[in-house]
Amino acid sequence: MKTAILVSSCDAFSDCWLPMIHSFKKYWPDCEYPIYFVTNFKSIDEKGITFIKVGQDKGFGSNMNKALELIEVDTVILFLDDYFLNKCIKNTMIRSHITYFIKESIDFLKIDYHDIIYRDENRIGNSFYCENPLDLKYSVNTAIALWKKEVLKSLCVEGISAWDFERNGISNIKKKNLHIKSATILSTSIENNTIKKISGPGAVCKGRWTMEGIEFLKKNGFSSLISKREIEGKFTRYITSLYSPNSILWLPFGLILRIIQKLKINI
């Protein structure tokens, strides 16, 4: 089965491309898989990177649908464009995941160090894999993961945003009567068996640089990009850090975040 890395992006996030590519070169210089960036009309000349221009930006779902049609692969390792890597990745680890993915006919295998849902109670034998029932909100998400191309495509509803993909993932599966086999990593094994990106939601949240994003840009010579966006407020970042589906405070924190986002407050 042919595997490729697919970075979901658009022209509005072109300021993330160079830092993202830099993180690949720094932490995964011997990557064995072709790397594709989904864009609208823009591209940059970078060796080893292919830009898939899908035309007018119609949202995550539409852009991904078109991009997936244009690449001849069976499996994709999905990234978002602000998932800057910050730890070296070993090809042996990725190969091991792909082998398991194929052998067990998995459709969606999460390998993100910062995933928000752990399924240790569903551990598969003595392995470092766990079943990932798609029942809780955000059990389908945009975390770094291996996806069967056609399964991912079936969930990329036209016009939806990445946030909608996560919020409505379970309902979309039910509406389409899909049967998706998913797995994730045992929480005690994440250190050596996952891809580690900068912590938090990524380098950008709701169009603003996060604290982690700012730190990465400064550390890696991209300070000039900071002025391209607003910077996330410290209070907003604090509430976001506490927001987790595993927390009993999930609903109240989620409500606070929705109010902040709706009123466009940044404090």
Image (cartoon, grey):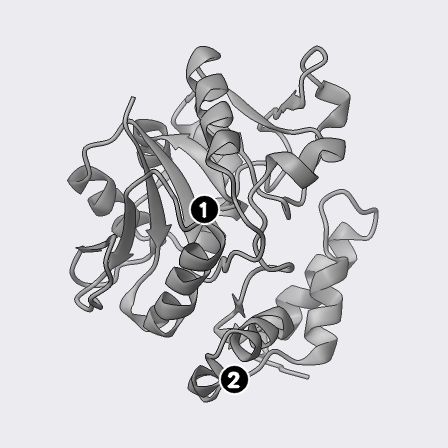
Q: Nearer the viewer, residue 17 or 61?
A: 17
Q: Nearer the viewer, residue 107 or 34?
A: 34
Q: Which residue is mark 1?
A: 165
Q: Amino acid at mark 2?
A: Glu
Say which label, 2 or 1, has the lower sequence index. Answer: 1
Q: Is residue 84 above or below residue 139?
A: below
Query: Element under label 1?
Result: helix
Residue sitting at 54 percent across and 35 percent down? 110
Image x and y of residue 107, in percent:
43, 23
Whether residue 179 is visible to the viewer of this picture, yes or no, is: no
Would you say 210 lies left or right of 154 here?
Answer: right
Image x and y of residue 240, in percent:
69, 63
Which label number is shown at residue 221? none
Q: Amino acid at mark 1?
A: Phe
Would you say 22 lies left or right of 239 here?
Answer: left
Which label number is shown at residue 230? 2
Q: CA distance from mark 2 to mark 1?
A: 25 Å
Image x and y of residue 112, in percent:
57, 42
Residue sitting at 17 percent across and 66 percent down? 41
Image x and y of residue 210, in percent:
59, 72
The C terminus is located in which quarter? bottom right
Residue sitting at 74 percent across and 67 percent down? 239
Q: Is residue 219 above or below residue 25?
A: below
